[in-house]
Image (spheres, rainbow, N blue to C red):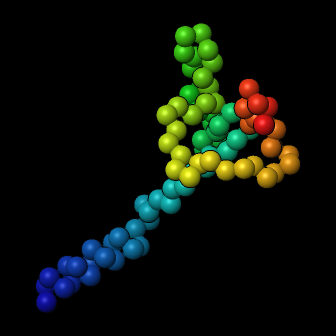
Amino acid sequence: MNLFKLLLFIVGLLLFSPNTVSAQTVVEIKGDQFYINGKPSYPGRTWNGFKVEGLLMNSRMEQGVFDDLNPESVNSFAYPDTKK
């Protein structure tokens, strides 16, 4: 019976704790830069003289190949060689 009361107490603490945090990551594209939680990725950073702020390094995108059907952004991410 004491074990049941202890478990009920712990569950109550977990459910009704005022320190419960609801975290959500927001990823946006502004122009040609990626923003994470309102800030550009790699803020102020360069690599070999190239600005890398706003880029996504080593991005693993499963099923990330798709056709952009949005007429407002379809040309924003065209390939340099084919312009498509």
Residue most extreme to the front: 82
Name the quarter where the C terminus is drawn: top right
Q: Residue furthest bottom?
A: 1
The residue lying toward the viewer, choosing from 2 and 63, is: 63
Residue visible at 33% across and 72% down? 13
State whether residue 79 is above or below residue 28. above
- Left or right of 15? Residue 22 is right
Residue 31: image location, x then y, percent: 77, 35
Q: Is residue 3 left or right of residue 51?
A: left
Relative image position of residue 78 (x, y in whole percent): 76, 35
Residue 30: name its quadrant: top right
Quarter residue 4 falls in: bottom left
Q: Is residue 17 visible?
A: yes
Can you say whether 54 is above or below 12 in the image?
above
Q: What residue is at 60 percent from the left and 41 percent from the top?
A: 36
> Which is more toward the observer, 81 or 63?
81
Residue 59, x across and y down, in percent:
52, 38
Q: Quadrant of the N terminus?
A: bottom left
Residue at the right extreme, as displayed: 71
Who is closer to the viewer here, 28 or 74?
74
* Residue that appears at 76% across and 31% down: 82
Depth check: 43 or 70 in front? 70
Residue 31 shows in this picture: no
The structure residue drawn at horizontal position 63% and vertical position 30%, both measured from the top left corner, is 54
